[in-house]
């Protein structure tokens, strides 16, 4: 994942942020896939680290994103996920709401279109995963599936597309 991000981002100033955020993101995806939980000990520090690293990147010359949009993206996506959680708490866990802070920040760095593309990519990946499991008889429509890995993979897709556009 780090090599992919380095390839698509190139020598942009935010590359260090992506490289530092990737290992804990992979750990979060593995934990959620295994135990269907996104622990606070990982989600909350990751959100803080994302915003701090992007704040630093925004101060460097030739930054290809906006820390302000990253901050607004974090707030927007976390608010949207909070609303979805309040409307239907059985459809997603609160760990996904906290993860939305990080995802919104990293996608928001490259702008609103990247935020939308990465967010939608996460949902499409989750839907494809669920449909594949249903088709193979591995799940029912009532079986809870971890959403974090799909969200994180969608964020990777969004960041890659955003970096290519930058």
Image (spheres, grey):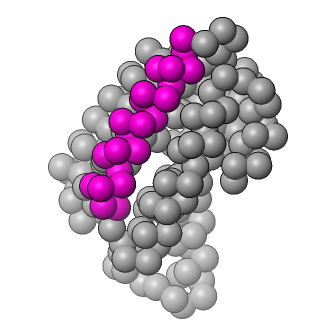
Q: Up-down: is 2 above or below 32? A: above
Identify the residue shown where x is 60% and y is 66%: 128
Question: x, y (%) of residue 125?
Answer: 58, 59
On whether residue 5 falls in the magenta region, the answer is: no
Which quarter of the rendered picture does the C terminus lie within?
A: top right
In front of the other: 33 or 138:
33
Q: Quadrant of residue 104?
A: top left
Q: Up-down: is 156 above or below 146? A: above
Q: Which region is colored magenta?
A: 38-59
Q: Quadrant of residue 38?
A: bottom left
* Residue 141 in sight here: no
Total number of numbered discs in the rendering: 0
Q: Is residue 74 left or right of residue 124?
A: left
* Residue 18 in sight here: yes
Identify the residue shown where x is 21% and y is 59%: 89
Q: Is residue 89 left or right of residue 26?
A: left
Q: Main secondary structure of the magenta part?
A: helix
Question: x, y (%) of residue 54?
Answer: 51, 25
Q: Residue furthest bottom?
A: 137
Identify the residue shown where x is 38% and y is 31%: 74
Q: Residue furthest left?
A: 86
On whether residue 56 falls in the magenta region, the answer is: yes
Q: Up-down: is 77 above or below 124? A: above
Q: Up-down: is 99 above or below 101? A: below
Identify the residue shown where x is 60% and y is 24%: 110
Q: Quadrant of residue 68?
A: top left
Q: Is residue 113 left or right of residue 75?
A: right
Question: x, y (%) of residue 5?
Answer: 72, 42
């Amino acid at each position: 994942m780090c090599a992919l991000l380095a390839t698509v981002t190139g020598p942009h100033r935010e590359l260090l942020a992506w490289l530092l955020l990737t290992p804990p993101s992979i750990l979060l995806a593995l934990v959620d896939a295994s135990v269907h939980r996104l622990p606070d000990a990982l989600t909350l520090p990751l959100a803080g680290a994302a915003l701090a690293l992007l704040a630093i990147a925004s101060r460097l010359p030739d930054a290809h994103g906006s820390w302000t949009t990253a901050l607004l993206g974090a707030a927007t996506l976390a608010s949207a996920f909070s609303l979805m959680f309040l409307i239907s708490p059985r459809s997603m866990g609160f760990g996904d709401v906290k993860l939305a802070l990080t995802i919104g920040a990293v996608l928001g760095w490259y702008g609103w279109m990247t935020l939308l593309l990465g967010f939608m990519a996460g949902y499409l990946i989750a839907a494809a995963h669920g449909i594949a499991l249903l088709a193979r008889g591995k799940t029912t429509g009532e079986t809870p599936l971890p959403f974090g890995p799909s969200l994180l993979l969608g964020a990777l897709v969004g960041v890659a597309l955003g970096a290519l556009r930058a």
